[in-house]
Image (tube, grey):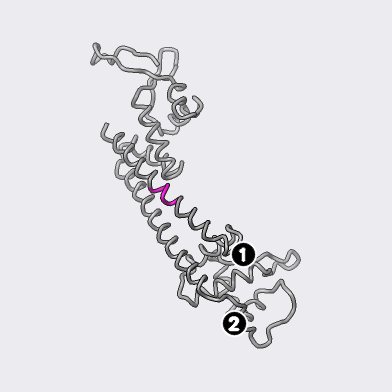
Amino acid sequence: MVSNPGSPGNPGSKRTTLRPADLAREHGLSPQAVRNYEQDGFLPPAERTATGYRIYTELHATALRTFLALVRAYGHRTAGAIMNAVHDGRTDDALTAVHGGHTQLLRDRETLTAVRAAVDHLATTTITAPVPAPGDPAGPLPRSIGELAHRLRLTPATLRTWEAAGILRPARDPATGYRVFHASDVRDADLAHLLRRGGYRLQDIAAVVEQIRTAGGTSALAATLAGWQQRLTDRGLAMLNAAAHLHNYLVR
C-alpha cells in the first residue's frame, strides 16, 4: 500500500493506491481473482503505471466489498450483472435485479409456508394405501404407469403431469423405455394424491416430496424445514447487508 500524489487537477492532494494483493488479502482471494473481477466489469477499470501494473484505490476496494456482499445475497451471476449495470450507468437495471432477488425470496418464503401447512396436513392424516381399484394387478413392484394409475384411480396423463412437475421421478425400463414405479415412487404418488385431495398446488406438493426425499422420510422432515427456514433468514440478512454496501457505492 503506497501513498502517491493526487491527480494533476489536485496536485496537493494524496491518495492511497493499492495492489491487487492488497485487495485480495482482505477477502482471502488470490490477486488473479481480483484482476479477473476487474476484467469482467465487477470493479471499475484500474489505472496503469508506465510499466503496465494496475493501480487500485479505495474505490476499487469498496467495489470489491460491494460485489462480494452481493454474491452472498444473490449469487455470482446476479451480483455480476448488478455491478456491470452500475458501472455502465444503468442504475435502474441494477435496482431491477436487486428487486428480482427480493421477489424470489418472498416466493421462497411463501413456498415454505405452504410446505409447512402440507406437512401438518400429512401429520394429522393417516396415510394408508388406497383401496385397490377393481382389477388392480396383484403382482409385486415395480409397477407400470397404467398399473399405478389404476391403483390410485387416476389417469396415466395425471401421473405424467405429476412427473413433469417434479413430484414423480420414475425410472425407465432399459429394454422398452417405459416408466417403472418402485416402492419410493408409489410412496410419492400416495403423498401427492393425498395432498391434491387437500387442495394443494402441484408446485407445493413437489416441494414437499423433494424435502421428504432429501430428509430421508417424513420423520426427519422437521429438521429439514428448520434448516430451510434458517437459509431463508440468512439470505434475507445478506440482502440487507448487500443493500447497504450497494447504496454506499452508488452515492460515493
Q: Please, what is the three-letter code of the amino acid marked with disc 1?
A: Arg
Give the left or right position of residue 81, taking residue 165 as reference: left
Say if 239 sits above or below 113 in the image: above
**Which residues, given as a range, are shown in magenta?**
231-236
Residue 153, label in figure: 2
Q: Residue at x 49, y 29 (%)?
A: 28
Within 10 Å of disc 1 (Cα), the crowding (few <14, some 14-19, many 20+) is some
Label 1 – label 2 distance at C-alpha: 19 Å
Identify which residue, 60 or 212, lies in the foreground. Answer: 212
Total numbered labels = 2
Residue 169, label in figure: 1
Q: Please, what is the three-letter code of the amino acid marked with disc 2?
A: Arg
Q: Residue at x 46, y 70 (%)?
A: 201
Q: Position of residue 237 (x, y in %)?
A: 38, 45
Q: Secondary structure at mark 1?
A: loop
Residue 57, label in figure: none
Q: Position of residue 139 (x, y in %)?
A: 74, 78
Quadrant in the rendering for residue 192: bottom right
Identify which residue, 221 or 187, lies in the foreground. Answer: 221
